[in-house]
Amino acid sequence: MIFYIILLNMIKVYIILSIIFIMLETIGIYNDLNGLKKASNNVSNSFSKLSSGKKNLLEESPADYHIAKSLEERVNTSEIAMRNISTASNMLSIADGSVQSAINRLIELKKEAISYNDGSTNSSQKNALLDRMNAVGSEILDTLNSSNFNGFDILNTDSFEFQVGSDSTDKLDINFDISNLDLIFSEDIKVDLAIIMDNSGSLGEEQVGIENNLQNLVNELESENVDLALGLTRFGASLNGGDPIVGELTTDTDDFINNIWNQNTLDGSIEPTYDAIEDTANNMEFRVGSNRYLMVVGDENPDQGDSGQSEALTAINSINGKLIAVTEPGFYNDFESITNGSDGFTININDDFSSVISEVKNQILDSAKPDFLTQIEDNLSILLKLSQKIGRTINRLDNKEINLSTHILNTEKSRSRIEDIDFAKESMNQMKAEILMQSSTQILKLRMNSMAYILKLFG
Protein backbone atom coordinates (compact mmCIF):
# COMPACT_ATOMS: atom_id res chain seq x y z
CA MET A 1 0.00 0.00 0.00
CA ILE A 2 2.82 2.31 0.94
CA PHE A 3 4.54 1.44 -2.34
CA TYR A 4 1.52 2.54 -4.34
CA ILE A 5 1.29 5.77 -2.39
CA ILE A 6 4.96 6.49 -3.04
CA LEU A 7 4.59 5.60 -6.71
CA LEU A 8 1.53 7.83 -6.99
CA ASN A 9 3.40 10.71 -5.40
CA MET A 10 6.32 10.18 -7.71
CA ILE A 11 4.00 10.26 -10.68
CA LYS A 12 2.48 13.47 -9.42
CA VAL A 13 5.94 15.02 -8.98
CA TYR A 14 6.90 13.90 -12.46
CA ILE A 15 3.75 15.38 -13.90
CA ILE A 16 4.31 18.66 -12.04
CA LEU A 17 7.93 18.78 -13.12
CA SER A 18 6.91 18.00 -16.73
CA ILE A 19 4.33 20.74 -16.64
CA ILE A 20 6.90 23.13 -15.24
CA PHE A 21 9.37 22.04 -17.94
CA ILE A 22 6.76 22.47 -20.63
CA MET A 23 5.91 25.92 -19.32
CA LEU A 24 9.57 26.91 -19.23
CA GLU A 25 10.13 25.53 -22.72
CA THR A 26 7.07 27.37 -23.96
CA ILE A 27 8.45 30.61 -22.54
CA GLY A 28 11.83 29.82 -24.09
CA ILE A 29 10.19 29.09 -27.46
CA TYR A 30 8.33 32.39 -27.23
CA ASN A 31 11.56 34.22 -26.47
CA ASP A 32 13.35 32.37 -29.24
CA LEU A 33 10.58 33.31 -31.67
CA ASN A 34 10.91 36.95 -30.66
CA GLY A 35 14.67 36.75 -31.09
CA LEU A 36 14.22 35.08 -34.46
CA LYS A 37 11.73 37.75 -35.51
CA LYS A 38 14.11 40.49 -34.39
CA ALA A 39 17.02 38.88 -36.19
CA SER A 40 14.86 38.46 -39.29
CA ASN A 41 13.85 42.14 -39.14
CA ASN A 42 17.49 43.14 -38.74
CA VAL A 43 18.40 41.07 -41.79
CA SER A 44 15.52 42.61 -43.73
CA ASN A 45 16.52 46.15 -42.67
CA SER A 46 20.12 45.51 -43.62
CA PHE A 47 19.06 44.19 -47.04
CA SER A 48 16.83 47.23 -47.52
CA LYS A 49 19.59 49.68 -46.57
CA LEU A 50 22.18 47.91 -48.70
CA SER A 51 19.87 47.82 -51.71
CA SER A 52 18.88 51.53 -51.42
CA GLY A 53 22.15 52.81 -49.98
CA LYS A 54 20.20 54.97 -47.52
CA LYS A 55 19.33 54.91 -43.85
CA ASN A 56 15.75 54.58 -42.70
CA LEU A 57 15.75 58.13 -41.31
CA LEU A 58 11.99 58.54 -41.37
CA GLU A 59 11.74 55.98 -38.56
CA GLU A 60 15.16 56.32 -36.97
CA SER A 61 15.57 60.15 -36.93
CA PRO A 62 12.78 62.35 -38.39
CA ALA A 63 14.83 65.51 -37.71
CA ASP A 64 17.76 64.19 -39.77
CA TYR A 65 15.30 63.10 -42.45
CA HIS A 66 14.02 66.69 -42.76
CA ILE A 67 17.57 68.07 -42.98
CA ALA A 68 18.59 65.49 -45.59
CA LYS A 69 15.56 66.25 -47.79
CA SER A 70 16.23 69.99 -47.52
CA LEU A 71 19.83 69.44 -48.65
CA GLU A 72 18.65 67.16 -51.46
CA GLU A 73 16.29 69.89 -52.66
CA ARG A 74 19.14 72.42 -52.73
CA VAL A 75 21.28 70.03 -54.75
CA ASN A 76 18.46 69.46 -57.25
CA THR A 77 17.73 73.19 -57.71
CA SER A 78 21.46 73.91 -58.02
CA GLU A 79 21.80 71.28 -60.74
CA ILE A 80 18.91 72.92 -62.62
CA ALA A 81 20.64 76.28 -62.16
CA MET A 82 23.79 74.74 -63.68
CA ARG A 83 21.77 73.79 -66.75
CA ASN A 84 20.39 77.34 -66.90
CA ILE A 85 23.94 78.70 -66.79
CA SER A 86 24.86 76.42 -69.67
CA THR A 87 21.85 77.71 -71.63
CA ALA A 88 22.77 81.32 -70.90
CA SER A 89 26.37 80.68 -71.95
CA ASN A 90 25.20 79.18 -75.23
CA MET A 91 22.98 82.21 -75.83
CA LEU A 92 25.83 84.60 -75.07
CA SER A 93 28.15 82.74 -77.42
CA ILE A 94 25.66 83.21 -80.25
CA ALA A 95 25.25 86.90 -79.40
CA ASP A 96 29.01 87.42 -79.17
CA GLY A 97 29.54 85.81 -82.57
CA SER A 98 27.01 88.16 -84.16
CA VAL A 99 28.47 91.23 -82.46
CA GLN A 100 32.04 90.33 -83.46
CA SER A 101 30.90 89.85 -87.04
CA ALA A 102 29.20 93.27 -86.99
CA ILE A 103 32.32 94.91 -85.53
CA ASN A 104 34.51 93.44 -88.26
CA ARG A 105 32.10 94.61 -90.96
CA LEU A 106 32.03 98.14 -89.52
CA ILE A 107 35.82 98.31 -89.42
CA GLU A 108 35.89 97.33 -93.09
CA LEU A 109 33.21 99.93 -93.81
CA LYS A 110 35.52 102.74 -92.69
CA LYS A 111 37.37 102.33 -96.00
CA GLU A 112 34.27 103.45 -97.90
CA ALA A 113 33.77 106.40 -95.55
CA ILE A 114 37.37 107.52 -96.07
CA SER A 115 36.98 107.19 -99.84
CA TYR A 116 33.76 109.22 -99.64
CA ASN A 117 35.66 112.08 -97.96
CA ASP A 118 38.41 112.04 -100.61
CA GLY A 119 38.33 115.31 -102.52
CA SER A 120 38.97 113.49 -105.78
CA THR A 121 35.79 111.40 -105.46
CA ASN A 122 33.08 112.68 -107.81
CA SER A 123 29.36 112.76 -107.06
CA SER A 124 28.50 109.53 -108.88
CA GLN A 125 31.28 107.72 -107.03
CA LYS A 126 30.04 109.18 -103.75
CA ASN A 127 26.54 107.93 -104.49
CA ALA A 128 27.93 104.47 -105.21
CA LEU A 129 29.92 104.51 -101.95
CA LEU A 130 26.82 105.68 -100.06
CA ASP A 131 24.79 102.82 -101.56
CA ARG A 132 27.54 100.41 -100.58
CA MET A 133 27.63 101.70 -96.97
CA ASN A 134 23.84 101.43 -96.64
CA ALA A 135 23.90 97.90 -98.05
CA VAL A 136 26.55 96.82 -95.54
CA GLY A 137 24.68 98.62 -92.76
CA SER A 138 21.53 96.72 -93.65
CA GLU A 139 23.44 93.42 -93.65
CA ILE A 140 24.91 94.21 -90.23
CA LEU A 141 21.45 94.91 -88.80
CA ASP A 142 20.14 91.68 -90.34
CA THR A 143 23.00 89.77 -88.71
CA LEU A 144 22.32 91.28 -85.30
CA ASN A 145 18.54 90.98 -85.51
CA SER A 146 18.75 87.35 -86.62
CA SER A 147 20.72 86.30 -83.53
CA ASN A 148 18.24 83.73 -82.31
CA PHE A 149 18.14 81.13 -79.54
CA ASN A 150 15.26 78.74 -79.08
CA GLY A 151 12.95 81.04 -81.03
CA PHE A 152 13.89 84.23 -79.13
CA ASP A 153 15.73 87.24 -80.55
CA ILE A 154 18.78 87.77 -78.37
CA LEU A 155 19.88 91.28 -79.35
CA ASN A 156 16.52 92.80 -80.14
CA THR A 157 14.42 92.12 -77.05
CA ASP A 158 13.85 93.64 -73.63
CA SER A 159 15.62 91.12 -71.40
CA PHE A 160 16.09 87.48 -70.44
CA GLU A 161 16.00 86.24 -66.85
CA PHE A 162 17.86 83.11 -65.78
CA GLN A 163 17.69 81.35 -62.41
CA VAL A 164 21.38 80.76 -61.72
CA GLY A 165 21.27 79.64 -58.08
CA SER A 166 19.27 77.67 -55.53
CA ASP A 167 17.76 80.81 -53.99
CA SER A 168 14.78 82.56 -55.58
CA THR A 169 16.65 85.88 -55.60
CA ASP A 170 19.70 84.44 -57.35
CA LYS A 171 18.83 85.50 -60.89
CA LEU A 172 20.67 86.92 -63.89
CA ASP A 173 19.06 89.50 -66.17
CA ILE A 174 20.51 89.68 -69.67
CA ASN A 175 19.67 92.78 -71.68
CA PHE A 176 21.49 93.68 -74.89
CA ASP A 177 20.10 96.91 -76.33
CA ILE A 178 21.06 97.76 -79.91
CA SER A 179 18.30 100.32 -80.45
CA ASN A 180 20.86 103.16 -80.46
CA LEU A 181 22.59 101.81 -83.55
CA ASP A 182 22.18 104.03 -86.61
CA LEU A 183 23.38 102.23 -89.74
CA ILE A 184 21.43 104.31 -92.23
CA PHE A 185 23.93 106.57 -93.98
CA SER A 186 22.45 109.76 -95.38
CA GLU A 187 23.81 113.04 -96.74
CA ASP A 188 21.28 114.90 -94.57
CA ILE A 189 23.05 116.84 -91.81
CA LYS A 190 22.43 115.79 -88.21
CA VAL A 191 23.20 118.42 -85.55
CA ASP A 192 23.13 118.07 -81.75
CA LEU A 193 23.31 121.46 -80.00
CA ALA A 194 23.85 121.42 -76.23
CA ILE A 195 23.32 124.82 -74.63
CA ILE A 196 25.32 125.13 -71.41
CA MET A 197 23.60 127.98 -69.55
CA ASP A 198 24.91 129.94 -66.57
CA ASN A 199 22.11 130.16 -63.97
CA SER A 200 23.67 132.94 -61.90
CA GLY A 201 21.76 136.14 -61.20
CA SER A 202 23.60 138.24 -63.81
CA LEU A 203 22.44 136.23 -66.85
CA GLY A 204 18.74 137.11 -66.89
CA GLU A 205 18.84 139.16 -70.11
CA GLU A 206 20.93 136.52 -71.86
CA GLN A 207 18.47 133.74 -70.96
CA VAL A 208 15.59 135.81 -72.33
CA GLY A 209 17.63 136.73 -75.43
CA ILE A 210 18.28 133.05 -76.24
CA GLU A 211 14.65 132.13 -75.57
CA ASN A 212 13.39 134.86 -77.91
CA ASN A 213 15.68 133.78 -80.76
CA LEU A 214 15.76 130.00 -80.42
CA GLN A 215 12.74 129.52 -82.66
CA ASN A 216 14.48 131.48 -85.44
CA LEU A 217 17.53 129.22 -85.07
CA VAL A 218 15.36 126.12 -85.29
CA ASN A 219 13.42 127.38 -88.30
CA GLU A 220 16.50 128.42 -90.28
CA LEU A 221 18.39 125.18 -89.61
CA GLU A 222 15.40 123.01 -90.44
CA SER A 223 14.86 125.01 -93.64
CA GLU A 224 18.34 123.80 -94.63
CA ASN A 225 17.25 120.17 -93.98
CA VAL A 226 19.24 119.99 -90.75
CA ASP A 227 18.06 117.25 -88.39
CA LEU A 228 18.33 119.20 -85.13
CA ALA A 229 18.31 118.05 -81.49
CA LEU A 230 18.61 120.40 -78.52
CA GLY A 231 19.84 119.77 -74.98
CA LEU A 232 20.24 121.90 -71.86
CA THR A 233 22.92 121.85 -69.18
CA ARG A 234 22.49 124.29 -66.29
CA PHE A 235 25.36 125.29 -64.01
CA GLY A 236 25.65 127.68 -61.10
CA ALA A 237 22.08 126.98 -59.92
CA SER A 238 21.61 126.80 -56.15
CA LEU A 239 19.57 123.59 -56.61
CA ASN A 240 22.73 121.54 -57.14
CA GLY A 241 25.16 123.69 -55.20
CA GLY A 242 26.35 125.24 -58.45
CA ASP A 243 27.40 121.90 -59.96
CA PRO A 244 26.27 121.15 -63.54
CA ILE A 245 22.84 119.63 -64.15
CA VAL A 246 23.04 117.77 -67.47
CA GLY A 247 19.78 117.22 -69.32
CA GLU A 248 18.84 115.04 -72.27
CA LEU A 249 18.84 115.78 -75.97
CA THR A 250 15.47 116.03 -77.68
CA THR A 251 14.36 116.43 -81.27
CA ASP A 252 11.11 117.99 -80.00
CA THR A 253 12.29 121.58 -80.37
CA ASP A 254 8.90 123.02 -79.37
CA ASP A 255 9.05 121.20 -76.04
CA PHE A 256 12.61 122.41 -75.53
CA ILE A 257 11.72 126.07 -76.16
CA ASN A 258 8.43 126.12 -74.27
CA ASN A 259 9.21 123.81 -71.34
CA ILE A 260 12.78 122.64 -70.93
CA TRP A 261 14.31 126.10 -71.34
CA ASN A 262 12.10 127.38 -68.53
CA GLN A 263 14.03 125.20 -66.08
CA ASN A 264 16.72 127.87 -66.03
CA THR A 265 17.00 129.93 -62.84
CA LEU A 266 18.83 133.09 -61.69
CA ASP A 267 19.65 132.04 -58.13
CA GLY A 268 23.23 130.84 -58.49
CA SER A 269 26.60 132.27 -57.54
CA ILE A 270 29.43 129.76 -58.16
CA GLU A 271 29.93 129.21 -61.90
CA PRO A 272 32.11 126.13 -62.67
CA THR A 273 32.07 126.55 -66.46
CA TYR A 274 34.84 124.07 -67.28
CA ASP A 275 33.06 121.44 -65.15
CA ALA A 276 29.85 122.08 -67.07
CA ILE A 277 31.61 121.63 -70.43
CA GLU A 278 33.28 118.39 -69.30
CA ASP A 279 30.13 116.93 -67.72
CA THR A 280 28.04 117.74 -70.78
CA ALA A 281 30.51 116.07 -73.14
CA ASN A 282 30.79 113.01 -70.90
CA ASN A 283 27.19 112.53 -69.81
CA MET A 284 24.83 113.88 -72.47
CA GLU A 285 23.84 111.08 -74.86
CA PHE A 286 24.55 112.43 -78.34
CA ARG A 287 23.04 110.79 -81.36
CA VAL A 288 25.03 108.45 -83.55
CA GLY A 289 26.81 110.26 -86.37
CA SER A 290 25.73 113.75 -85.31
CA ASN A 291 27.68 117.01 -85.54
CA ARG A 292 28.08 118.03 -81.89
CA TYR A 293 28.16 121.63 -80.73
CA LEU A 294 28.46 122.71 -77.11
CA MET A 295 27.36 126.35 -76.72
CA VAL A 296 28.41 127.68 -73.30
CA VAL A 297 26.94 131.00 -72.13
CA GLY A 298 28.61 132.71 -69.16
CA ASP A 299 30.02 136.05 -68.08
CA GLU A 300 32.44 135.06 -65.31
CA ASN A 301 35.81 133.39 -64.88
CA PRO A 302 35.19 129.79 -66.10
CA ASP A 303 37.77 128.28 -63.75
CA GLN A 304 35.61 127.99 -60.61
CA GLY A 305 35.37 124.21 -60.32
CA ASP A 306 37.47 121.06 -60.27
CA SER A 307 38.16 120.85 -64.01
CA GLY A 308 40.40 123.04 -66.14
CA GLN A 309 40.79 123.81 -69.84
CA SER A 310 42.66 120.58 -70.57
CA GLU A 311 39.97 118.36 -69.02
CA ALA A 312 37.23 120.25 -70.85
CA LEU A 313 39.09 120.00 -74.18
CA THR A 314 39.75 116.26 -73.70
CA ALA A 315 36.07 115.64 -73.03
CA ILE A 316 34.96 117.61 -76.11
CA ASN A 317 37.50 115.87 -78.34
CA SER A 318 36.32 112.49 -77.05
CA ILE A 319 32.94 113.15 -78.69
CA ASN A 320 34.41 114.98 -81.70
CA GLY A 321 32.55 118.11 -80.62
CA LYS A 322 33.00 121.85 -81.14
CA LEU A 323 32.82 124.55 -78.46
CA ILE A 324 30.92 127.81 -78.99
CA ALA A 325 31.91 130.15 -76.15
CA VAL A 326 29.49 133.08 -75.67
CA THR A 327 31.30 135.14 -73.05
CA GLU A 328 32.93 138.43 -72.16
CA PRO A 329 35.87 139.36 -74.45
CA GLY A 330 38.04 139.50 -71.35
CA PHE A 331 37.61 135.72 -70.94
CA TYR A 332 38.33 134.76 -74.58
CA ASN A 333 41.81 133.62 -73.59
CA ASP A 334 40.34 131.31 -70.97
CA PHE A 335 38.51 129.44 -73.74
CA GLU A 336 41.15 129.79 -76.45
CA SER A 337 42.78 126.39 -76.07
CA ILE A 338 39.35 124.70 -76.11
CA THR A 339 37.93 126.59 -79.10
CA ASN A 340 41.17 126.18 -81.07
CA GLY A 341 41.47 122.53 -80.13
CA SER A 342 37.88 121.73 -81.13
CA ASP A 343 37.52 123.96 -84.22
CA GLY A 344 35.14 126.11 -82.22
CA PHE A 345 34.77 129.88 -81.87
CA THR A 346 33.91 132.67 -79.42
CA ILE A 347 31.07 135.24 -79.52
CA ASN A 348 30.74 138.44 -77.53
CA ILE A 349 28.02 137.99 -74.92
CA ASN A 350 27.30 141.71 -75.03
CA ASP A 351 26.07 141.54 -78.65
CA ASP A 352 22.37 141.55 -79.35
CA PHE A 353 21.24 137.93 -79.06
CA SER A 354 19.55 137.98 -82.44
CA SER A 355 23.03 138.44 -83.92
CA VAL A 356 24.52 135.91 -81.48
CA ILE A 357 22.04 133.22 -82.53
CA SER A 358 22.49 134.18 -86.19
CA GLU A 359 26.25 133.73 -85.82
CA VAL A 360 25.69 130.31 -84.23
CA LYS A 361 23.43 129.34 -87.12
CA ASN A 362 25.94 130.48 -89.75
CA GLN A 363 28.82 128.65 -88.08
CA ILE A 364 26.80 125.45 -87.85
CA LEU A 365 25.78 125.58 -91.51
CA ASP A 366 29.37 126.32 -92.56
CA SER A 367 30.96 123.49 -90.54
CA ALA A 368 28.29 120.79 -90.21
CA LYS A 369 28.40 118.02 -92.77
CA PRO A 370 27.60 114.34 -93.06
CA ASP A 371 30.30 112.65 -91.00
CA PHE A 372 30.20 108.99 -91.87
CA LEU A 373 33.47 108.24 -90.07
CA THR A 374 32.04 109.58 -86.82
CA GLN A 375 28.83 107.64 -87.45
CA ILE A 376 30.81 104.44 -87.93
CA GLU A 377 32.93 105.17 -84.85
CA ASP A 378 29.79 105.81 -82.77
CA ASN A 379 28.28 102.51 -83.91
CA LEU A 380 31.57 100.75 -83.22
CA SER A 381 31.61 102.23 -79.72
CA ILE A 382 28.11 100.86 -79.05
CA LEU A 383 29.05 97.39 -80.30
CA LEU A 384 32.38 97.33 -78.48
CA LYS A 385 30.65 98.22 -75.21
CA LEU A 386 28.10 95.51 -75.95
CA SER A 387 30.90 93.01 -76.61
CA GLN A 388 32.54 93.96 -73.32
CA LYS A 389 29.22 93.51 -71.54
CA ILE A 390 28.82 90.05 -73.08
CA GLY A 391 32.38 89.16 -72.03
CA ARG A 392 31.79 90.33 -68.46
CA THR A 393 28.55 88.35 -68.32
CA ILE A 394 30.29 85.20 -69.61
CA ASN A 395 33.01 85.60 -66.96
CA ARG A 396 30.33 86.07 -64.32
CA LEU A 397 28.58 82.90 -65.48
CA ASP A 398 31.86 80.96 -65.46
CA ASN A 399 32.52 82.02 -61.87
CA LYS A 400 28.93 81.23 -60.95
CA GLU A 401 29.29 77.76 -62.47
CA ILE A 402 32.46 77.10 -60.44
CA ASN A 403 30.78 78.29 -57.25
CA LEU A 404 27.68 76.20 -57.95
CA SER A 405 29.80 73.10 -58.60
CA THR A 406 31.53 73.58 -55.25
CA HIS A 407 28.19 74.25 -53.57
CA ILE A 408 26.65 71.08 -55.04
CA LEU A 409 29.66 68.98 -54.03
CA ASN A 410 29.71 70.23 -50.43
CA THR A 411 25.94 70.04 -50.03
CA GLU A 412 25.89 66.50 -51.42
CA LYS A 413 28.64 65.51 -48.97
CA SER A 414 26.59 66.89 -46.08
CA ARG A 415 23.46 65.08 -47.26
CA SER A 416 25.40 61.85 -47.76
CA ARG A 417 26.82 61.91 -44.23
CA ILE A 418 23.29 62.22 -42.85
CA GLU A 419 21.32 59.96 -45.18
CA ASP A 420 23.66 57.44 -46.85
CA ILE A 421 24.78 54.26 -45.10
CA ASP A 422 28.28 53.06 -44.35
CA PHE A 423 28.38 49.99 -46.62
CA ALA A 424 31.17 48.21 -44.71
CA LYS A 425 29.45 48.73 -41.38
CA GLU A 426 26.04 47.78 -42.72
CA SER A 427 27.46 44.62 -44.37
CA MET A 428 28.87 43.58 -40.98
CA ASN A 429 25.48 44.28 -39.40
CA GLN A 430 23.84 42.09 -42.02
CA MET A 431 26.26 39.22 -41.41
CA LYS A 432 25.72 39.54 -37.66
CA ALA A 433 21.94 39.52 -38.10
CA GLU A 434 22.10 36.44 -40.34
CA ILE A 435 24.26 34.54 -37.80
CA LEU A 436 21.86 35.47 -35.00
CA MET A 437 18.91 34.37 -37.10
CA GLN A 438 20.56 31.02 -37.88
CA SER A 439 21.46 30.40 -34.21
CA SER A 440 17.95 31.41 -33.12
CA THR A 441 16.51 28.96 -35.63
CA GLN A 442 18.71 26.11 -34.33
CA ILE A 443 17.86 26.84 -30.69
CA LEU A 444 14.17 27.01 -31.52
CA LYS A 445 14.45 23.71 -33.33
CA LEU A 446 16.10 22.06 -30.29
CA ARG A 447 13.41 23.42 -27.97
CA MET A 448 10.68 22.13 -30.24
CA ASN A 449 12.31 18.66 -30.28
CA SER A 450 12.52 18.66 -26.47
CA MET A 451 8.89 19.66 -26.24
CA ALA A 452 7.93 16.83 -28.56
CA TYR A 453 9.84 14.30 -26.46
CA ILE A 454 8.11 15.36 -23.25
CA LEU A 455 4.71 15.33 -24.95
CA LYS A 456 5.38 11.74 -26.07
CA LEU A 457 5.69 10.67 -22.48
CA PHE A 458 2.19 11.95 -21.84
CA GLY A 459 0.98 10.09 -24.87
Image (cartoon, helix red, strand yellow):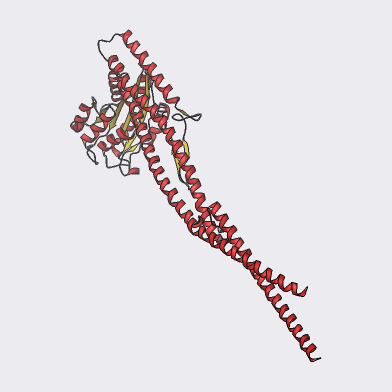
Would you say 207 lies left or right of 335 here?
right
Farthest-out residue, right: 1
Q: Nearer the viewer, residue 295 or 105?
A: 105
The quarter of the image holding the C terminus is: bottom right
Would you say 175 lies left or right of 47 here?
left
Residue at the image position 37 percent from the left and 26 percent from the top: 229
**Do we see residue 186 in this rendering?**
no
Q: How many numbered discs sit on the rendered protein?
A: 0
Q: Quadrant of residue 202?
A: top left
Would you say 309 lies left or right of 72 here?
left
Q: Quadrant of residue 113?
A: top left
Q: Nearer the viewer, residue 56 or 106?
A: 56
Residue at the image position 74 percent from the left and 85 percent from the top: 10
Q: Nearer the viewer, residue 21 or 120?
A: 21
Q: Position of residue 361 (x, y in %)?
A: 31, 21
Q: Is residue 153 above or below residue 239?
A: above
